[in-house]
Image: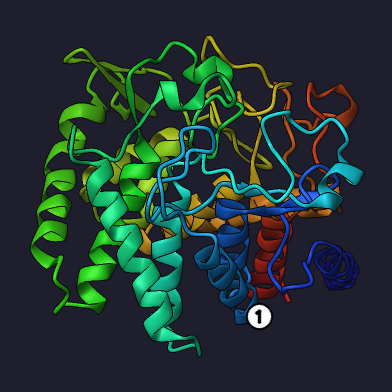
Amino acid sequence: MEKELENIRIKLLNALEKIKSDSGYLYAGYPRFMELFGRDSLISSLQLLYLSPDFLKNSLNVLSKYQGNKYDVETGEEPGKILHELSNPRTYVENPDKESWVGVNKPIFLSIDSTPLFIISALTFIKKNYEINLDSIQKSVEKSIIWLLKKSENTGFVTYNTIELDGKLASMGWMDGAWDLYDKLSGDIALIEVQGYAYEALRLFNEIFPDNNLYKRVNDEIIYLKNNINKYFWIDDIKYYSPAISICNGKINALKNIASSPGHLLITDIIDINKKRAIVDKLFGKNMFTPYGIRTVSIEDTICDILKYQSGSIWPNDNWIILEGLKKSGFIAESNKLILSLLKAVKYLKEPYEYYSVDNNNNIINNKYLVIKPCEFQAWTIGLFLNIIDNHFL
């Protein structure tokens, strides 16, 4: 088995070299996403932090460089916000059918999660005492913290409005292609995983910089998120969290779909251990867990379509965050179970595809049948697979 994994590892390292930019950060994936993405570069860099801290250092530096400094309705730019996507001329060579609203070398800011993930990543880098320009990165983090606080002023939660998307993406979260999940929402949208990211980002900021001028405002928001997430997101009749709520004209609508995104709360202490147990039980139930990882949406959900992009398929970035949360929250048996399932995926696929899907009989589906063909290799899949192999099996 070790020889097989060593051969796969070599293949993964070669793929990693192919998506490394000249500036040392990782492009999202080949062939459609050979460009900088905020969340993708940060998540893959965190996965690979044990292997090369430079990936994260370079990602933080380039994202700081393009950090928002004005309001622009067309691109979604806002002061302190971290970009979603930055194309380059190569983008269009590899992907000539690129969306018309993405322009060459024009930062696009249509994400709500890149900014809290940037804060978490930067503060994680600082806590580990890796070398970085502390004054510069602290200023960027503070700008992002102010953005987070401003985004939560109206509702208490970190939200975006569907008007901002203008039909370009399904959401401003990582499941931005899950139209079936989010298309009924309107108004201000709060994604469950983003509230967890925001909580963790704010908590880390006050922990590392206790003398900061924003301490009280940050602490007040931390308390609000912790005190209200169950009130607005917990669905008692299904004993699970809603993946998103919409706030429109004073009315709150909570989606009742069983999705994987509440599993991202496991990396934080925003909820107690009993609620974490409920999440874990749902994720490892027969409708979500497969021999190759956790689905994005329950196979029994009315919107589930395992051939679609994010409506029941399996995404490595999603599974990695859940895995880290399981370990952090003390669910060791379940984390080991997930590790083994992901190892099985590594050995079966042998390639770091963007995503993959499993049918009702627990067989991986041939990529040619999927509605959107996965990238041949994706940064956060390389990161997950290398992390699993290096830290658990070699």
Snapshot quadrant of residue 371: top right
In this figure, which residue is indicated by the disc labeled 1?
52
* Position of residue 76 measured from the top left corner of the image (x, y, whole percent): 48, 38
Disc 1 packing (10 Å; few <14; some 14–19; many ≥20):
few
* Position of residue 299 measured from the top left corner of the image (x, y, whole percent): 58, 20
Residue 73 can be seen, yes or no: yes
Vertical comparison of 362 with 54: above or below: above
Colour option used: rainbow
* Position of residue 2 measured from the top left corner of the image (x, y, whole percent): 83, 72
The C terminus sits in image quarter: bottom right
Relative to residue 142, is residue 46 drawn left or right? right
Q: Amino acid at mark 1?
A: Ser
Residue drawn where x is 65% and y is 37% of the image: 314
* Position of residue 267 measured from the top left corner of the image (x, y, whole percent): 37, 56
The N terminus sits in image quarter: bottom right
Relative to residue 311, is residue 155 drawn left or right? left
Residue drawn where x is 23% and y is 41% of the image: 152
Q: How many marks?
A: 1
Residue drawn where x is 69% and y is 42% of the image: 292
Residue drawn where x is 46% and y is 78% of the image: 125
Vertical comparison of 259 with 56: above or below: above
Looking at the image, which is closer to me, 216 or 366?
A: 216
Residue 348 can be seen, yes or no: no
Looking at the image, which is closer to me, 390 or 214?
A: 214
Q: Secondary structure at mark 1?
A: loop
